[in-house]
Every structure is written in structure tokens, then in C-alpha cells.
Amino acid sequence: MAKKKEPPKKMKPTMDAWFEGAGTTQEESITDTLKENYLPYAMSVIISRALPEIDGFKPSHRKLLYTMYKMGLLNGPRTKSANVVGQTMRLNPHGDQAIYETMVRLTRANECLLHPYVDSKGNFGKHYSRDMAFAASRYTEVKLAPIAETLFSEIDRETVDFVPNYDNTMQEPSLLPATFPSILVNANMGIAVSMASNICPFNLQELCDTCIALMKNPAHDILSTLKGPDFPSGGYILYDEAELRRVYDTGRGSIRLRSKWNYDKAAGCIEVTEIPYTTTLEQIKDKIAELVKAGKLREVSYARDEIDVNGFRLAIDIKRGTDPDKLMQKLFRVTPLQDSFGCNFNILIGNQPRVMGIRQILEEWLAFREECVRRRVFYDLSKKKDKLHLLEGLKKILLDIDKAIAIIRATPEEALVVKNLMDGFSIDEIQAEYVAEIKLRHLNREYILQKIEDVDKLRDEIADMEDILANPKRIRKIIEHELKDTAKKYGQPRRTMFYYGSEEEDAPVEDETPDYPVNLFLSNEGYFKKITPQSLRMSGEQKVKEGDYIAQQFEASNKTELLFFTNKAQVYKCRAAFFEDGKASNLGDYIPVKLGFDEDEQVVRMVITDDYMGTLLFIYENGKASKVPLSAYATKTNRKKLTGACSDKSPLVKLFHLTEESAPLLLRSSGNRAILIDAAMIPEKASRSTQGVNVMSIKTGQSVVSAVIPDGELLEAAESYRVRNIPAAGKLAKDLEDADQMSLV
């Protein structure tokens, strides 16, 4: 019989085997990786950081304000900001600087909010300035502003849920029970992952009136009471009812804001006193300076900052004879003195981000507020029921106070006092405990009768509260009373007014570029000159670098569009007015530096146009050619750079701007062969980056080396090389002059 094979012995893995497995990777789906690692982060940013909730606050705001409330800063004196920041770190672990910056935005001094929640002392910077930095937290002082009372007046009455903080050492509120829709009173912006929120502020009085109107009539026209946003920076809203209704209905849209200004005739300057909420003083000044330097704002001589204790003031000095009204219309079009606020009312409702219109937001807030009021009434009801229960026990003692004293005196042990009182008066343990704790001085008929008088009052109050809980209309009535009280106490006049301008002000900016004849020159190495005819007549020979020469020259105007095609299949666009007038004795502007070319990028050809008519003909080294309409390079916006200007499959040999469909074209290869074709044989393509069609057949290792549009004697000599069909290999060029020596077209 054959022996039974024994199973192989298990070998211990050697160190060499371990090293062989080291460094190996395991394939994993990128979608699985994103779900496992990135999705939790994205949800955390959306839910716990960037988007506000229905109470109007992000977690960072809520933690800071609640900390200040617990520190007694609602009614107490101010304290150093550093103290508040340190205490807030018990709830917010993101660092002291992040907490302090959150506080800065909530302060009165920063002027970021329509109704600031923090009363401040010291330098907290300004919302309208990029460079006015706030002081360190050790120098500034803060306390809660009076309006913060509406956030915390009932927070200790179980109106909202409390959750553990990040290390589970204390509790914090999940929401703040604000008595007004704070979500729409103060501006709130947040950028989450794949979504954002941008909520504009509204006037508190108008918003409270709108809430009350909606409670009475759900179909109420919101625009009739909520006139429009009200920004803390003031200024004007360019009134557009259709756009406002779109914002109110969908939560998305754009609101145009305009600065407030006046003209000081004596000083000869325009004084801007209020600017759009979306911009800063420095952005406006920088833009004005840029336009003045570029010669596009010749009416302005200087813009200066004159901010002082009286508030914002930007002075714009204008030149004599300038119409300030026309100048301001121009400034509104070309500077941030007129800007837009993009609305995106994205709010967390039940940990779910939702973009809602004003009506939906107020309905959600009213539902939230109803729940707060219901929980508050239920809390008060429970307290009153407990008090009534105690007083009913006390009432029984009134029947025989002496008996109660006798029971207490006759009880040998303290632990039995409560039990004996329960047995003697038929009361429960809670009532007996309450009676046993009454001080000896209160065991008189007057005290007890005074307490018992509250029983009937308590019963009426309890019945009233139970009716409130059973009647939603009464809850709405309480909310209405609170809204009226808040509006009366904290309402303020509207800061942002409405401007009902004419459509003429929205007309496009007139082109004020001066127009005069110029001569344009481009050298082979990329130096550009713009010279007026008068200067050219008085000049001598054109100055160029050693080895360089003038490759192109044109007669044009100062408004002519220039297109500089490069060796990297890109085109850079500008006007001739972009360059300063020069002289023949100067080298000119180096185009790669002037227009910001990429590294190792050089000019191949310059094309000029006033109307983008005609076609561009590209000839490549691989023997192909493409024809593209020049209109394909026209853009509605003022773009300076276009990628994919031509094919990048083969180097560009020559580029021609054709104004007529038919034109002779002479090509020569490195194999000294030539062909003459008509440009009409090359089909026109709409795509700029098209590879074109094969025109000249060339052998491996050879290439097209030159392309010219011949005329005169050269055209007569080239007629023998004309071909009827393409592609064609051509024939040896024996009787042609070197095409490279011909003048360029």
C-alpha cells in the first residue's frame, strides 16, 4: 500500500519574505475613499461650521454669545476680550484667534451687523476697510449688547435642547430662543463644501411687521411690508421689483448697491459718505488709481481717505470743468462705488441645508418660535403645578397648627418627622417635607393664610396655561406681542434707501479712448513700437537690437485691436492705446514682458483689425494649412489671453490675414521643392485649434520652411509650380528667388 502523504509543515515567514511584501499597495476605488474620508469632513463643515441655522447663528457665534451670557456680561460691566476668548475655548476648540475674529464681527465698533450683539470698547477695525486692523484681545473690552437679552431671556426655561460640549464636560444650547427672526436681521455669509450661504440683512421693524402680517394672512404680499434689504453701511439699493420678488420667492438673486455722495463745490471734490456693503475703501481707491494711471479716468486728479471720528468719508478731487453727475455715473459703472450683493439664502433646517425664500424662512422661524413658546409655557406650568401641590399641603396644616407642632415635638427621631406628618394630615412626602422645612417664625396664621391666598390665583394661571398649550392661536398671539415689543424696543430707522434711476444710467460705458493715426512696428525678436505720423516724419532710421530687424509694420489708429500670436498656440489681445507713443530712436516695448507671456513664449505674428473681418491662414511645418475666420477671436468680454488660438500639433511657419477669399500662396520645403496654390482651395473651419488640411506632401525628415503671398515678378516665376489639387509634392525650385528674402505681408 502506498504511504499516506503527510500535509506539508507550516513554515514560519522569514525576514526576506516579509520585506518582499513590504511597500505593496492595494487597489481601492476612489469613490470608496472619498465616501470614507472626505464625505464626513464635508458634512461636518456644512452642519457644524459654515451654514447658519434658523436662530440666525453659526456654532461659533452661538458658543461665543452663550459663554458671555454665562459670564454675566448681559447686565454686568465690560471685561477684557481675552477673558471671553479664554472662556469660550471650553466650547470652541478652534483656537483663540478664530474665536476673537468671530467676536470682532459681532461688535458694534466693527459696523458689520445691522444690530450688533456685542457692546465694545477699543479698536475693533472697520468692516468697510481692508487695512484697518483690530487691536489684540488684551487691549479691547466687551459685554453683551442690550438686544442680546432677546436671545437669552428664556434660555433657562427649557425652551431649547442642550447638548454636551466637545469634551463632554459641560452643556451648551443647540439653538438660541431669539424672540425675533434674527436669521434675516443680520448679514450672514458662509462657505461650506460644494455649497455656500449669503444672507442679506433686513430692517428689524419691517421684518417684525411682516411676521405679524404672515401670521394673520399666510398669503400676505411680503414686498408690501418688507421693502427690501437694509445694510449697516447705508447707501442706496437700485430698486428692481422683479429682482426683489425673485429673491423673496427663491432665496437667490442679485441686489445692486450704490454709494451715497455729494459734491463740495468750494473744495472741488466729490465726497462719498456711504459705500456698498460688499466692497471696501481700499478696493475703491485702488480701482480709481488704476483707471487714472491707464488714462481712462482723466477727470479725476486724486482720491483720498478722510475717515475720522465722524465716520466714513472718501474725497475724490476732480478737475476743473468736470460735470460731477456725469463723472459719478461713470464711476458707478467702472468702480466698486456700485456693486452687487449676491443672495443665497441657504440655511440649515434640521441639519439639512435648504435654499429658501423669505416666506419659507419666516414660516420655519415661526414654527421654531412656536415650539419655544410651547416649551416655555409647559415649563412654567410644571413649576406652578408643583407650587400648587405644596400650597395644598400647607392648607391642610391650617386646620390644626397645634397638631402639627405636637407631632413634630412628639417624634423621637428627626428621620420620622416627615412620615408622621404624612400620617397625621394625609399628605404626600413632598408636601410633608415642605411643611417640615418651614421656619418656626412662619408657623403663624397670618403667614399661612397669605400663602393659601395664592392657591386660587395659581389655579387660574394653570388653567390659562393649559388653554394656551391647547390653542395654537393663543401661542401666535404671544409671538405677535413679543415681536411688537422687540420692534418697539430695538427698531431703528432704515439706513439703506431706494434709488429709482432711469434706464439711461445702465447704458454701456462710452469708449473714451483717444483716436488718432499711428504707425505700428514689430521686430523679429518681439519689440513693438507705436509712433505717430508726425514723430515718424521727424525720425531717422528705426533703432533695433543687433541682429534684429523690423518684421511687420502697419498704418493704423490708436483704437486698433492687436492680436499677438505666439509659438505656444496662444493669442494675446490688446488695443494700440495700451502702448505709449514712442519714437524711432527707442527699442520699444518687449511684448513678452509687456503682455505677461508664459515662460519661453515668443511672438510669431501680429494681426491688426478694427472689425474682425477676413480670415486667418495658418501654415505649419508638417505641410498642413488651416483657415479660420478672424471673428472667432472676437470676445464680448475684455479678455486679454485666448488659449487654443491655433493647432499645436506642428510648429507654425507663417500666418496670413486674408481680406479676400482668393490669394496665391507659395510654399517651399526643406527639400527645395515648391508649390503654388490658391488660398481658396483650403476650406474654412470654425474651430480655432483645427489641424487643417494637408497641402504639401513632404518626405520624412523634411518640413515646410517658408510661405509667402507672391506678387510681381515672383508670382510670374512661380506660375510653373502651380498645382490643381492638394496635397501635392511640388517640384524642385531652380528658378525661384529665396522666398525668405521677400517682404512680409
Image (cartoon, rainbow, N blue to C red):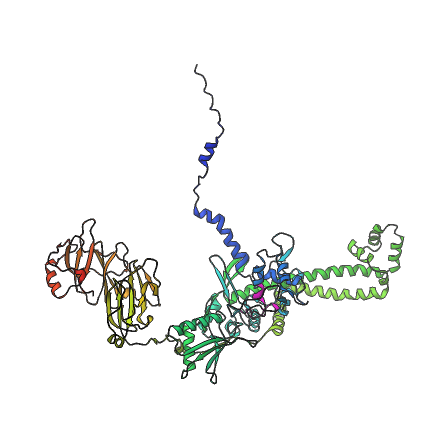
Left or right of 67 on screen, residue 518: left
Count of marks, rendered view = 0
The x and y percentages for residue 622 are 22, 53
Residue placed most toward the observer, 372 or 454? 372
Q: Quadrant of residue 656?
A: bottom left
Q: Which residues are magenta?
A: 102-126
Q: Residue at x 54, y 58 (%)?
A: 49
User: Could one spot residue 679 in this view of the protein?
Assistant: no
Indicate yes or no whether the magenta region holds residue 117. Answer: yes
What is the quadrant of residue 454 in the picture?
bottom right
Q: Position of residue 640 (x, y in %)?
A: 34, 65
Q: Quadrant of residue 722?
A: bottom left
Is 82 on the left or on the right of 192, as rendered?
right
Which quadrant does the N terminus fall into? top left
Tell me what residue is drawn at x 86 percent, y 57 percent: 404
Q: Quadrant of the C terminus?
A: bottom left
Name, please, the residue furthest toward the front: 546
- Residue closest to the eye, 224 or 491: 491
| Residue found farthest to the bottom | 266
> Viewer-proximal residue, 368 or 333?
333
Q: Is residue 132 visible?
A: yes
Q: Give the overall secondary structure of the magenta segment.
A: loop
**Residue 8's x, y, as percent?**
46, 24
Residue at horizontal 41 percent and vertical 71 percent from the top: 290
Q: Position of residue 194 (x, y in %)?
A: 46, 57
Residue 184 counted in the magenta span = no
